[in-house]
Amino acid sequence: MVLEANTDHWNKERGPRLEKITYVNDMDPSEALNQVCDSEGEIDIVSEVSPADAQRVIDSDHAHLVTIDAMRIVSGLINRDRDFMDDVRVRKAPNLAVDKARLISDVFQGYAHPVAAMSPPYSGAPTDIEPYPHDPEEAKRRLEEAGWPQDRALVLATTSDVAPVADYLAESFRESLGIEVDLVSVPDEGLAAAQKALVEKKIPQHFDVLAHA
Amino acid sequence: MAQPTQETATWKPGDAPVGEVRVVDPHPLNWLYVTWNTMEEPVRTDERGEIVGACMEDSHWEGSTLVVKVRDGVRFQDGTTLTSASIKRAFDEVQKWVAPHPPGTYLNFHPDTAVDCPDESTIRFNFPEPDGLALAKFRGFHIASDRFWDEGGFGGKVYGTSEGHW
């Protein structure tokens, strides 16, 4: 896709500064990373560099790593229509079960920070609340208090882009809460339909928690 | 290893655009960032998240009716002029959808909203009830030329509906 500058745009303060932007989105992202790290000219910008690839960019002679405060917030969307999930004690349990500091250091290689709400820090996020602490004992206590059956597995759904996060969450839930977790992946080819069903509030949705960004 | 030095280009408003940038953007919302930076909306948000007028120059409320003054001199990429009729067409096209916005239906306008254009510079949104989020909703209300809608819009011509083809 090629975007050409609209030189007649009413707002001269905004530009346009560039004559042309060419999106080469049919190039495989790993090939794009090769191009930007190992050559000059073919590709100028690659977005969505994974934390695992960050050091490679830093070590490159050609590329420059730019980190920004992301617009994406990775969260666990809780489905209150499922059995037990309408109980606030049950909803707090998975929040308390996850060591967010380790999630950030191990899964995101440090390229993330915790938030206490769905607003990014630069966009009006509340400053007087803190994320839930990591407290596995309290998490387990709340779940037991709410009567969560031992043979009831928690269904954790995920999209492919946050699959490593979901793996970490599943491990945390099993370890901290002492329950089984069924990990379900939304296939990429079904993502648009799943998003549509979600925003149209088509129920029932068959997950307890959806790892989502 | 030392990182390459970033060069700072000197640019000032009114300068001619220069150069080409080639991008690979695998972000699942890449279409959204392109949309936000190529289409007109009644308002934009500044770096602090405050709403500022874009193709809407001004607005005021008359009861539950939002009266919008359209900015003069706004032209689309194809050279046609953005008028109140352009905004009404965008409204009519998107109002057909159940859920036009991936974040959720809270960004929808009320289905019983009626829109009229007394002249090319004025459009009135007659909401059946007050809508305190109306100006914020305007940020995601994309205004396009007739050519955009006639040649496919957001996928509607190809798929029969634009829903689910974000």
Image: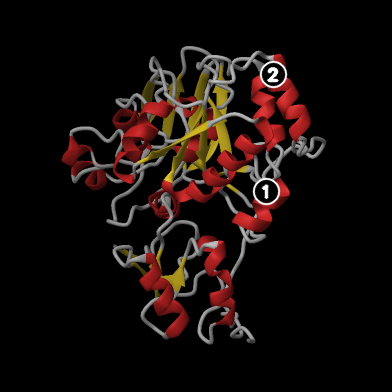
Distance Cα–Cα, label 2 vs label 1: 44 Å
- Chain at numbered mark 1: B
Residue at screen point 39% across, 14% down: B112
Q: Is residue B69 above or below residue A5?
A: above
Give, as a three-letter code, the residue at label 1: Arg
Q: Nearer the viewer, residue B139 or A89?
A: A89
**Residue B68 horizontal/vertical position (percent):** 49, 32
Q: Quadrant of the N terminus of chain B?
A: bottom right
In this rendering, position of residue B128 left or right of residue B6: left
- Chain at numbered mark 2: A
Give, as a three-letter code, the residue at label 2: Glu
- SS class of the residue under badge 2? helix
Residue A136 appears in which quarter of the rendering? top right
**Residue A209 horizontal/vertical position (percent):** 53, 30
Residue at the far right in the pictured view = A128
Disc number placed over residue B38 in the picture, else none: none
Are the residues flagged by discs 2 and 1 from a single subunit?
no
Residue A170 appears in which quarter of the rendering? top right
Q: Nearer the viewer, mark 2 or mark 1?
A: 2
Image colouring: secondary structure
Q: Nearer the viewer, residue A121 or A113?
A: A113
In this rendering, position of residue A150 left or right of residue A201: right
Q: Mark 1 = which residue? A: B48
**Residue A184 horizontal/vertical position (percent):** 42, 36
Residue A97 appears in which quarter of the rendering? top right
- SS class of the residue under badge 1? loop
- Is residue A69 at least partly visible in the picture? no
Q: Is residue A72 above or below residue B106?
A: below
Q: Mark 2 = which residue? A: A144
**Residue A48 horizontal/vertical position (percent):** 49, 61
